[in-house]
Image (cartoon, grey):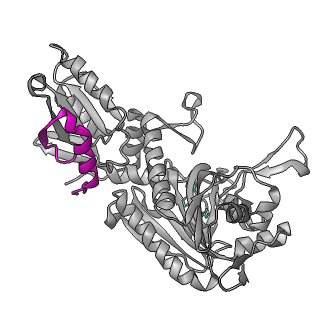
Amino acid sequence: MAEKLTMDTLVSLCKRRGFVYQSSDIYGGLSSAWDYGPLGVELKKNIQEFWWKEMTRLHDNIVGIDAAIMMHPRVWEASGHVENFTDPLVDCKNCRQRFREDKIPDENRIAKKCPDCGGDLTDPRQFNLMFKTYMGPVEEGGSLVYLRPETAQGIYVNFKNVLQTSRVKIPFGIAQVGKAFRNEITTKNFIFRTCEFEQMEMQFFIAPEEDDKWFEYWKKERWEYYKKIGIRQDKLRFHQHGPGELAHYAKDAYDIEYEFPMGWQELEGIHNRTNYDLTRHTEFSGKDQSYLEEVTNRRFVPFVIETSAGLTRTVLTVLSDAWEEEVVDEGDSRVVMHFHPLLAPVKLGVFPLVKKDGLAELAQKIELDLRGNFATFYDQGGAIGRRYRRQDEIGTPYCVTIDYQTKDDDTVTLRYRDSMEQVRIKIAQIPDFIAKADSEYRREK
Ligand code: GAP
């Protein structure tokens, strides 16, 4: 039977192979902060680029922006975050641990007993999740700023700028990728929930009466997106927010959930934010945020359908989904990461069969020539089988091996990661062959 992935296994693979490291490791680590290593940063960039292309370039009515993390503090009063962006926290009077009241088991919550030590819990207090800091040298009220808890507000406050400068007409969207910060109580789930994380958000501005139509459209689009990046469909599901779960700005919300090693959890939210944000910004800034529809001469405050995905959480999804420990033969198994080839941090491994007789030099030249096409990795160390396995473990979808025959007929052996099958192709065919294999890629299990 196939092994089930545990979070510990994933954390250790990520550290060993250079995907993700604990932050400030040499100082004992900073809890719930993580650094992306050489492979992790490539994987994250590939996910981001795929999302960007999918959400902006493939639509003629979606444009991008990149807003500052620190914004005018009134933004967060207008958005409702100063007042409403809170978690109910309880402290254990005995062991001093702090918990989110809504995340502890019912029996502990009702009995007001600590889930760890059984000590008495305090009454819940509302704790605002925004990080505060001070701009300028003096720590006084006037210079208070927040680190943004969502990237969305950077889009809303630029609604008019984009409208006036880029000839978009409703319906249209503005997309952004960037860091967000929340002072959360984090559980030990690796990069799932962290205080500093990245979001990929798109706000789609529409006529109010079209909200149901566009909400359904984006729910479908976003589901399809996860299919395109190769996430197994039986590991995804929708969850509609009940009245108690809805964020302060939302009329309706669906999460796309993924079955992570610790269970089903939110991966992305699709929200009908109505005209809440633009109306509030009109009130708080005194600047009208309405839209004039030219054809009808009608003026209205647009509704917004938001798609909000965690980039760092998608990295965890892609890593969890890709992992497999596979029995190859009796007594032989391999760990393989089945990344979709478009996301894989290394696309092509290039190996000489042996170092001698000019094979290493030939392989190096081939690798050099291919660098402009995709991410390559040259490896001449150890037995060829072990080199393949090392690439399997970091999810490299293709490897080519240069052997004595290469010298005679300019052919190499190309090995597929998933099936481990090998084919013989001409050196000159490698880029086209891989482009075709990428476009036809289907994960088998
Ligand atoms: N603008 C709407 C918004 O921020 P959200 O449901 O609070 O909505 C959207 O967050 C997505 O951002 C989540 O589905 C998740 O992927 C990601 N996210 C939120 N908080 C996170 C955290 N502490 N660590 C990592 N990712 C987080």
- The x, y position of residue 442, in whole percent, is 25, 57
**Does residue 271 appear left or right of residue 360 in this picture?**
right
Q: Is residue 210 magenta?
A: no
284 is higher (above) or lower (below) than 437: below
Q: Nearer the viewer, residue 297 or 176?
A: 297
Outermost residue to the front: 295
Q: Quadrant of the C terminus?
A: bottom left
**Residues rendered magenta in the picture:** 418-445
Q: Is residue 47 left or right of residue 340?
A: right
Q: Position of residue 202 (x, y in %)?
A: 57, 63
Q: Which percent across, then down, holds residue 139? A: 88, 43
**Is residue 116 something one can see in this rendering?**
no
Q: Is residue 435 magenta?
A: yes
**Which residue corresponds to the image point at 40% horizontal and 70% vertical from the top-left?**
237
Specify the quarter for ligand 1.
bottom right
| Image position, residue 344 (x, y; %) | 35, 44
Is residue 342 shown left or right of residue 112?
Answer: left
The number of discs equals: 0
Residue at image point 13% right, 40% down: 422
Which quarter of the rendering shows the N terminus?
Answer: bottom left
* Residue 444 appears anywhere in the view: yes
Q: Establish if 53 lies above or below 168.
A: above
The residue lying toward the viewer, choosing from 440 and 14, is 440
Instruction: Depth check: give the residue in front, 164 or 316.
Output: 164
| Quadrant assignment, res 291 | bottom right
Rendered image quadrant of residue 282: bottom right
* Quadrant assignment, res 380: top left
Q: At 16% across and 43% down in the image, what residue appears?
A: 420
The image shows residue 19, relative to residue 91, as above or below, that is above
Residue positioned 80% across, 55% down in the render: 72
- In the image, taking residue 381 as reference, residue 62 lies left or right, namely right
